[in-house]
Amino acid sequence: MPMLDGQVALITGAAGDLGNAMAVRLAREGAAVVMLDVLSESKAAKQITRVNESALVPARYLQVDVRERAAVDDAIANLERLDIVCSNAGVVEPSSFLDVTLESWQYHLDINLTGCFNICQAAARRMVKDETQGRIVLTSSWVGEIPWPEISPYTVSKAGVNMLTRAMARELATYGIRVNAIAPGIVNAGLAGHQLRTDAAYAARVAKVIPLGEPGSPNEIADAVLYLCSPATAYMTGTILLLDGGCSLFQFDS
């Protein structure tokens, strides 16, 4: 029997590289996946098809902005049940600290942190109401602990995600709800993938800081999410699971 048979899994940012890989991985294990993203359904058609190609239960797609709490509440209230939440929606816009605008700062916090709070609180309330001992998995980053140049709003928002994960885990444990986070390193996807292909200076910097020698892949991150949703982690809560290829070990020139 598939590992997640009969469970409903909600994934935000599901039209992005990481979120889509998560959706595919959970769908393969039998979860009925609900994909949330800010893109319209027509613009996310390829990502929806990718999930359904290997899904045991057809996926659903909802256009929802995680900053809009009423829309988040409605989306979760209308589900028949909720067992797993992957709070993955996020943004990053590179800029030196001296050039960060107030608008950019707020934009990162609104989506990466407040949006995460919106999804997680609404999901937790639903799980408590239904007496579901569910799993909540947040997407953090290795830079939530280690500053990386030119993305200070992003690093601060992910540091907030780390503490949100621990605070939720502490309070929701009494309901049997497990809350953990993944902290990917540099992944060949999304903005980082684009920069690796187009920005020689960025690619050169990356080449020096990963002890394992290469960026991670969306599938590797998705495997870790499945692990946190599986029976193997029934005794794990409040953990930030680091998957950074050793970036945080501070690789130095020999």
Image: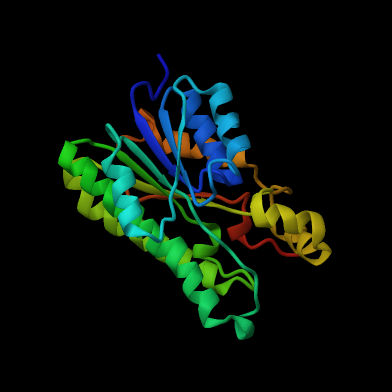
Residue at image x 34%, y 60%? 164
The percent coordinates of residue 30 (x first, y second) are: 43, 22
Quarter the N terminus occupies: top left
Question: Does residue 39 appear in this view?
Answer: yes
Residues 17 and 250: in front is 17
Residues 221 and 191: in front is 191
Left or right, 88 with reference to 101? left
The percent coordinates of residue 23 (x first, y second) are: 50, 35
Quarter the C terminus occupies: bottom right
Left or right, 133 with reference to 17? left
| Furthest residue in direction top, as rendered | 1
Residue at image x 46%, y 67%? 157
Residue 115 occupies which quadrant of the picture?
Answer: bottom left
Residue at image x 76%, y 56%? 196
Q: Is residue 214 above or below residue 45?
A: below
Question: Does residue 219 appear in this view?
Answer: no
Left or right, 7 with reference to 225? left
